[in-house]
Image (spheres, grey):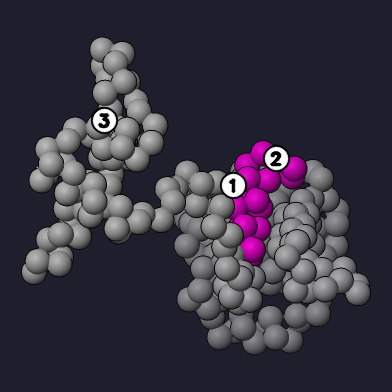
Amino acid sequence: MERQTFEGALHLWDEWHDSINKSRELLGYDPKWPKGKSISWIEEHYSDIRNQAEAVLRKLDLPPSLREYWEDCFYSDYRTEAGQVDYNKITRRLSDRKSLPALPCDYGVVWYEDEDTHDPWLRVEIRIHARFATKELFNYATRYAYDSVKSYLEREQAKEHPVCQWLKGGRPHADEGVALECVRLKDDEKLTHKEIGQHFGWALQKDSYGNLNQCSTSRRYVKLGRRLRKEYQS
């Protein structure tokens, strides 16, 4: 789920629009006023606007984190002549900055009281409003929670364990000496990839006929060796 998706869903719900229209009538605000008049009125009545927003969100059983976005909808003249929602006209406090609703979740690396913030074990917490606990929202929160982990690791200059290269589907660091020996055996001694693999004790793979005639490790090292040779000769 993205914030634009959540925004669209809110505006498909009639009660969202009803709450804004009724609140404008109650507080005496017209979104079609000139910008200068609107801003002056908002500054004078902001405490009433905020209280109304909080009351509306409680009534609609929506997260309080939506208060800022509800206020921006309240301020903005976002209806087209055809009655459609022009999302680009919903801006932060009548500025040029597009307003988007906060998603009903939060996430990040946290520490409890008396915990060592340099402990290698990290606690990542995800909180989701129970009435919006969809798979899409959980996936969003998980994705960005991992970003907070990466930020922490960069800040702490934590070094990744060497085993991680296999966990991520990567390959171990290639030994340049082995690569140069492999290219010598292949290009100078004319050994096959299978023979080079057997020489180093690497695993062999089957060809299309089911015969163990392939060696991906040998092929990779030969490719690297050729590149190294070219670099050294240039």
Q: Which residue is mark 1?
A: 1
The first of marks 1 and 2 along the sequence is 1
Q: Is residue 59 left or right of residue 38?
A: right
Q: Which residue is mark 2?
A: 134
Residue 181 in the image, given as x and y percentages of width and height: 24, 51
Bin the neighbour count of mark 1 within 10 Å (Cα to Cα): few under 14, some 14-19, many 20 and up: some
Residues at marks 1 and 2 touching, judged by CB atoms closer than 8 Å? yes
Label 1: which secondary element:
loop
The first of marks 1 and 3 along the sequence is 1
Residue sitting at x 74%, y 44%: 132
* Disc number placed over residue 25 in the picture, else none: none
Residue sitting at x 15%, y 59%: 229
Q: Which residue is mark 3?
A: 194
Is residue 144 shown in magenta? yes
Viewer-nearest residue: 49 or 68: 68
Q: Is residue 150 left or right of residue 14?
A: left
Q: Amino acid at mark 3?
A: Lys
Q: Of all residues shown, which one is farthest toward the top? A: 209
Cα distance between the residues tagged 1 and 3: 49 Å
Bin the neighbour count of mark 3 within 10 Å (Cα to Cα): few under 14, some 14-19, many 20 and up: many
Bin the neighbour count of mark 2 within 10 Å (Cα to Cα): few under 14, some 14-19, many 20 and up: few
Query: Splitting the image into 4 quarters, where does residue 103 fall?
Result: bottom right
Residue sitting at x 8%, y 69%: 234
Image: magenta residue range: 132-149
Q: Is residue 141 above or below residue 40?
A: above
Residue 24 in the image, given as x and y percentages of width and height: 71, 65
Residues at marks 3 and 2 touching, judged by CB atoms closer than 8 Å? no
